[in-house]
Amino acid sequence: MVAESVEKPFTAPALPASRMTASVDTRPDSWRFCVAPMLDWSDRHCRVFHRLLSRHARLYTEMVTTGALLHGDVGRHLDFDAVEHPVALQLGGSEPADLARCARLGEQWGYDEINLNCGCPSERVQRGAFGACLMAEPALVRDGVAAMCDAVGIPVTVKHRIGLGRDESYDFVRDFVGEVSRGGAQVFIVHARNAWLQGLSPKDNREVPPLRYPVVRRLKADFPGLRFVLNGGLTDPESCLAHLRPAPDDGSPALDGVMLGRQAYQNPWMLAAVDPVLFGEPAPLADRAAVVAALAGHVRAHVARGGRVREVVRHSLGLFNGLPGARRWRRTLSDAALLAGNDWRLIERAAQEVLPAEAVPASARAA
């Protein structure tokens, strides 16, 4: 571990007048609970599934590069279902003009937020000169944020790490946030680990660098006018509550929100506790049987439009984790021969493996 350097005196920067008007959702709970952007996972079908479990969770797309939007199939990347709102588009890129054009596309397609990825440590992202390596170029990030804020009227946010490599100096992340906020970003989603750009896989980068939650609270103390959302190592809505309250030991300020990723994906029923625990409202659906019935409707509509059953059901494999029959549910929805038939009723067939008979839709019981 590298010892922290002697810190410089700090005063939070004043935003230029031209950036003070950037549109931000002013509701205090707008970022209270978020589901992270997850490459190859948080596609539109995953987000529809998660919306069945929580009305209030803020959902994020997987990262979409500016090149994919400017030179590829825009509709394939940006299409989503209206039930997903609030939903944010995460962009990967570094050229301000390209980011502005893509942010404008996101706004035109109806997204509620544009998020810039400054946290992904993968080699592919590094070769494209974006993701976590952008933290070494705060002025470039500031300019990209400024270009996006000028192009759209929806919030422009940044997701980043708390440092690069083994250097744990607080000055580094503090100065990054200060500089980027001058571009107009007022919401920072902070994965509370450093990004080690050499020697670790993306998976290891989510687990090996130590979590340092106090750094994020310190950012909130230094920038009280900005919003900070904590990401990294969080497991369930109940454990998140402590981060949304002042710290009991030193009184450091409460954070504005939390973001869960892999836990929300791999154990999705956990999301059914989000609305009761964090928003004081009942979950949208009463039980897993109701979720299966609603998801079956989405599968049926998707197949009717020419889609594949596999594209939807792969996200629901963990719905019954820990319950009798969960393995049979997963096995049925992963069976290549059954999936090849592309029958939307496959999800109802799988439900017979895990739900009481009276909870299985009549169409499945008659099959």
Image (tube, rainbow, N blue to C red):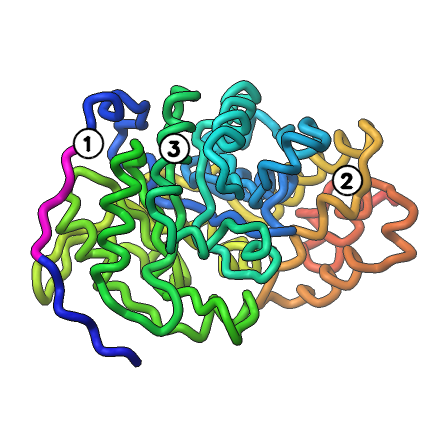
Pointer 3 residue: 156
As measured in the structure, the alpha-carbon distance from the residue carrying label 1 to the one carrying label 3 is 15 Å
Pointer 1 residue: 15
Give the camera-side residue of 267 and 170. 170
Look at the numbered disc 3 and give the secondary structure of its residue: strand
Task: Give the x, y percent position of residue 2.
Answer: 28, 78
Residue type at tag 3 = Val
As measured in the structure, the alpha-carbon distance from the residue carrying label 3 to the one carrying label 2 is 46 Å
Residue type at tag 1 = Leu
What segment carries the magenta color?
9-15
* Residue 6 lies in the magenta-colored region: no
Q: Is residue 285 visible?
A: no
Quadrant of the rendered image containing residue 164:
bottom left
Which part of the image, by quadrant, shows the C terminus? top right
- Number of labels in the image equals 3
Tell me whether the residue at label 1 lies in contact with that at label 3, contact meaning CB atoms closer than 8 angstroms: no
Give the camera-side residue of 279 and 258. 258
Quadrant of the rendered image containing residue 242:
bottom left
Task: Give the x, y percent position of residue 79.
Answer: 64, 28
Look at the numbered disc 1 and give the secondary structure of its residue: loop
* Residue 13 lies in the magenta-colored region: yes
Identify the mark at residue 362; answer none if there is no mark.
2
Look at 25% across and 57% down and name the residue there: 216
Look at the numbered disc 2 and give the secondary structure of its residue: helix
